[in-house]
Amino acid sequence: MNNIVRNNSEILDKVRVFEKEAIKNIPEGQKPSFHLCSPIGWINDPNGFSKFQGEYHLFYQYHPYDTKWGPMHWGHSKTKDFIKWEQLPVALAPDQEYDMGGCFSGSAVESDGKHILMYTGVLDKIQEDGTHLIRQTQCIAIGDGVDYEKLECNPVITSYSLPEGSNREDFRDPKIWKDGEDFYAVVGSRHADGSGQIILYKSKDLRGWTFVTILDRCENKIGRMWECPDFFNVDETDIMIISPMEVKADELNFHNGHNTVYLIGKYDKENHKFNREDYGTIDFGLDFYAPQTLETEDGRRIMIGWMQSWENNIVPKDLKWCGMMSIPRELTIKDGHLIQNPIREIKNYYKNDVEYKNVLIKGDTNLEGISGREIDMTVEITEGDYKEFGIKIAKNKEYETLITFEPIRNIVSFDRSYSARLCDALHKREMNVRNQNGKIKLRLIIDKYSVEIFVNDGEQVMTSTFYTTLDATDISFYAKGEAEINIQKHSIVLD
Ligand code: FRU
């Protein structure tokens, strides 16, 4: 490869050795079973979620040296089925002047047998006159699925390419794709009014990029800066995903400050015009941010998100790792809304299936065979006369995590107030669900420290973490009134 800087710098060598050694000290069985999590230290956004040589790769924002955010590297894993992950050595380290402040978020694409990474390099230095210079630019690294080399001509896009009226400081998180012979990328930026805009760039050779258009703008209506854009077509609908910062709460939407939103509309590819028709919340939980998607070999659009939040993240004191990814989710469109369901490959890991039909729930009820911290469980209320129905998970004598449905208010809620966190921080979320006369379907994906609640076959999702000790495995049900339910429970076992 010409014009490529060898990237296995001392900084990269050092982190690869550190990571390999440090992981050995993590007790067996401590990490989630089927959710990708930090190998050691801190992770945030998923990056470079892509297909490469018949496997699926995921990189992530990574600071292995501490359980707090720090100079960003790209950690790396791959999978064949989105459930079982294999860890690979760190792919990128902040080792060039233009990315010394961190290799920030980005994406990947396969082209001519090579794996192309596109990321934001952050230059962060004190200049001779004592002023502090921070610049975000877009950079390319090319590799073979394990080792990546940064282009000598990096950065390939600087903020000078932005149209007039743009702020030149926030410029990050490129999502790259290939259409025919051309590469395209959307990048998050800010208008001078302080609010987000998504810029489209085009390139023939990855080295030279030209500004095409501003695809969409926030105009201070959906938060401020728009981070981590993604842009794709699913079920003949064009979707742009954004992670807006500083969004004002609107009824039960956008309570996290940093939120996840899908913009839905039509993209006129010839003229590069995105005509937004509507938008919606992607996830209503306490812990979901910066999602990214890929298309599988069989044409499914899969999304994965960081299962944590900026404002409210919990760093358990006794763990040497911090941060997990959501379960990869299959995206479809129904009646103009985004539908999310857990990746179907999870079914290949079902064990100890337990089924109940037409069970009448009144007070607090335990059911034989229904327990566990690594399960996929669907609870369907088929009829009843009740004010509130609840599921208590991760329960022992001291602790419980609560999921409720109130048919009168059409609200599903999550509450981790009694999940063992030793402070009264933010623990609750509520979301509106479609009223079906007291009927509802709740599918819970639980993996040690998290629950993802998929309502009515993926119409709404609520994702949250909790760090209750792992001996709390009981599950019980209650109804204020009477509710008749069906349950299907599967343990998830990876051998
Ligand atoms: C989103 C984000 C990105 C940035 C990265 C830094 O969570 O702030 O915009 O690239 O995290 O780690």
Image (cartoon, grey):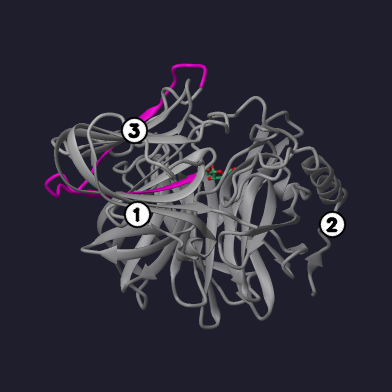
Residue 43 visible within the image: yes
N-terminal-most mark, 1 or 2:
2
What element does badge 2 sit on?
A: loop
The magenta region covers 421-446
Percent coordinates x, y for residue 473 in the rendering:
50, 35
Disc 2: which residue: 8
Residue located beneath label 3 in the image:
429
- Image x and y of residue 29, in percent: 67, 42
Q: Residues within 10 Å of mark 3 (few under 14, many from 20)?
A: many
Residue 121 in percent (x, y) is at 66, 50
> Quadrant of residue 67 in the image?
top right
Tell which tag, 3 or 1, sits nearer the viewer: 3
Name the side, left or right, on which 291 lies relative to 436: right
Dot 3 or dot 1, earlier in sequence: 1
Label 1, secondary structure: give it: strand
Q: Residue at the location (73% across, 30% down)?
A: 129
* Residue 442 part of the magenta segment: yes
Callout 2 amino acid: Asn
Q: Amino acid at mark 3?
A: Arg
Judging by the rendered image, the residue that carries numbered circle 1 is: 262
* Residue 166 x, y percent position in the rendering: 45, 48
Of 129 and 361, nearer the camera is: 361
Residue at the spot 52% in from the left edge and 65% down from the top edge: 348
Left or right, residue 467 beside residue 356? right
Up-down: is 178 above or below 379? below
Q: Residue at x 79, y 67 (%)?
A: 4
